[in-house]
Amino acid sequence: MTYKVLIVDDEPNIVISLEFLMTECGYEVAIARDGAQALEQMAAFQPDLVLLDVMLPLRNGFEVCQTIRENSAWNRTKVVMLSAKSRDLEVSKGLALGADAYITKPFSTRELVEQVRSLLARHDRSDE
Amino acid sequence: MIVTMIARRRFGIALTLLFAVQVLIGAAILASLALDIPNAQRAWLREMLLQRAAVWIALSTLLLFALGFGLKALFDAYITPVARLAEDAVLLAANPGHRITVRGARDVRVLVEKLNALATAHQTLHNDVQEKIELANRALAEEKNRLAALMAELALSVLVCNIDGRILLFNTRARQLLRTGHQGVSAIGLGRSVFGVIESGLVLHALEQIQHQLQDPRDDMAPPVCSFVATLADGQIVRAHMAPVFDSVRALNGFVLTLEDITRHVEADNRRDALVQSLTQDTRATLANIRAAVETIQTFPDMSGAKRTQFTAIIGDESMRLAAQIERAVQQGSNATDSRRELEDMRGTDLIALLLRRIGGPSLRVTAGDTIDATLWLRVDSYALTQALAYLSRRLAADAGVTELRFDLQRADRLAHLDLVWSGAPLPADTLRAWEHAPLPVSAGGLALTLNSVIARHGGESVYRCEPAEGRARYRVMLQAAEPRSAFDIAPPPTGRPEFYDFDLFHQPGQSAEIDQCLLSQLSYTVFDTETTGLDPAAGDEIVSIGALRIVNGRLLQQETFDRLIEPRGELSAESTRIHGLTHAMLKGQPRVEAVLPQFRDFAADTVLVAHNAAFDMRFLQMLEARTGVAFRQPVLDTLLLSQVIHPHQPGHSLEAIAARLGVPVIGRHTALGDAIVTGEVFLRMIPLLAEKGIVTLKDARDAAQQTLYARIRY
């Protein structure tokens, strides 16, 4: 099956790279530019994994992550937070809100792809 | 008036009694006669008496009149004058200038003369004593003035409070810092509570910590102190430092608070934090974009040409963004680090004036340029900067033969350019550089200063430039410009040495439930007066002016007054204008009573109200209670009633009459504040007179006033 990845970021330049990478990995990709769109896409696109920026217009990434985790329908969706907010405090907050990984910017694309792959593999196992 | 009424009553009683005694004696004589004689003669006697009844009645009436006249003469000569004499004698004690003018019998007149002679002797003695006291006080006053001067010139705000938080002392800085209370009424004043300015919880917490330190002295050497940061009503942030004050037996009976306005430092710190935060986040985000693009190109070398172009564009784009971010951060950073605490804000023109005074001499003429920006403020260590530039000037004069030097000061965006301009042959830049690094003849805390290090301490830079076309050279010091200070910050210190301290307040009792038992001499009062459009508030008459001042610890505080005009809703009659002199034009545009009354309530908080004919003013205030929601629930004393208590036999209890009696000069009458001042003076002189009558507490005074004749008259 083809995994679905939702990219949530308001910076077009990072979205281009992420979209390219995820497509090259063979995933189906959707894009959201702000927190509200992200939640709409969650319902419409039903992604297996979300690449979620923190500093977003309308609703920030922390809020979006919290909303995803509060909805039991999405509890198998993996959330990877991607942010320039890099203090321990913020990383802890993201993980505490239920993110599966918190990757600080700038990040290595190779590590990101590996992280996504391993999370989706776990997603597979939890499927079985 | 009163004295006549009372005398008349006494006279009537005496006359009636005297007449009754006469009639009784007559009747007794007749009765004894009638009992001693035989029946026939008794009948004859009765017959004779009855026949001459008209004569008897006429004789009795005549007797009554004769008695009346005699008694009246006796009263006028002895009884009434003696009653007045007694009151006047008491007055002599209060007002040594007072002389008795009572008329009466010769004996009474002799007594008056003797008393007046005694009064003159007493006055002379009184004056002598006063003079001696004054001499003794002068030395004390000198000490106090020294203290006041010290306090006034301190750069820190200082408040001294007693253990209840009442302010006993404050300096000018403190008044400036804490001047904004509720609705613009100064929140700070002698005898006022410090809790009106700083949250009580904070102060009590600090006090508790100090008490704890006192009980548990871990290190005897360290005096117990406590610091905290408080936010004032208008958002200012102050760092407060509390130190205890002890009485003679080492018991804690007050504290000293030194306050420092750290609002600007806190803001600068916040700005710097925000800057660091945004700098790291923005950079990380941009770097992430670049790195992702680069790595994608590297990972997928055989991507399409269009895709590759897109990623290269991203890299170019983001690199530009990164550069812009860093540029912006540098700019903001120079502002945020602008909180060097050893530097003082100074007006540019003041710095130039200072340089002109310090630099120059017979061989070097120093001038200021024509284009100095008067609105420019600098953040400088003026001492070090002046020393450094003086050194440079001396080198220029001595080594380069410069005889004329000009200072220019101009704003350049966020910077200030302080230029030294001279004419003459150009100097090699190396020479200037050597001077910049040469030690100055002064040092700061043991560190050798150089012109270069002084400029660096200011976060500044220097540029030396020859302008051969103009035949001159320019040494430019670039400094941070500071935010211009508000009018509040640069307000000149008030002239004179106002009475900002009163250490006797250490022993002042609290004014709460036990207020009725408080001594009149120790209470705090707000003496006030109102001017109105007429006499009847129920008929729509209104207050047009309120004047007030406070009495704290037996002193009328003329430095802090409340003086407000009020625009009435209705018309102002010509009649009332004649009394108080306020015209419609003067009141137009003044605040309404709804705005003024809350201010007056705050001014009068925690005090007993005092007014002359207080019932009149209180009725106006009560009528406004429903409309303004401002209620005055504190006790009220009325000088009219108290005068009646002290001098029931004196004619007249108008403010003028009382003031004249008590030797209070009357000035500025029929302005609310003028009348309030006179009332206050009068009230202060009444306190010892009341004490002579055994009226010492607030309750005593209120009870006595209640029982006077005037109190029963309805207004």
Image (tube, coloured by chain):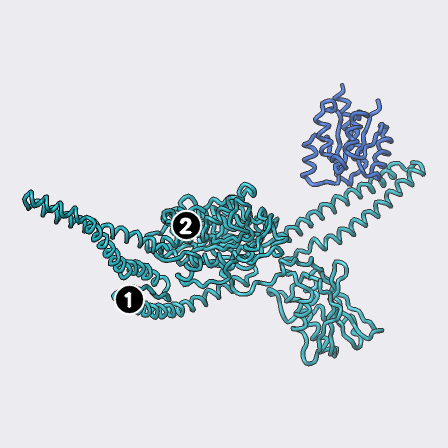
Q: Which residue is the extreme one toward the top?
A: A128
The chain that appears cyan in the image is B
Q: Position of residue B226 (x, y in %)?
A: 51, 50
Is A36 above or below relative to B341?
A: above
The residue lying furthest to the bottom in this view is: B362
- Find chain A in the image and tell me its colour: blue
Give coordinates of residue A37: x percent, y percent: 79, 31
Circles 1 and 2 on the same chain: yes
Labelled disc at residue B406? none
SS label for mark 1: helix
Identify the residue at horizontal 42%, vertical 68% (top origin).
B139
Contact check, label 1 and label 2, Cβ < 8 Å: no
Q: Residue at x 89, y 43 (%)?
A: B313
Query: Which amino acid type is shown beneath numbered disc 1?
Result: Arg
* Residue B508 at x, y percent in the picture: 42, 52
Considering depth in this image, is B703 or B33 the residue closer to the camera? B33
- In the displayed structure, would residue A127 be above or below residue B580? above
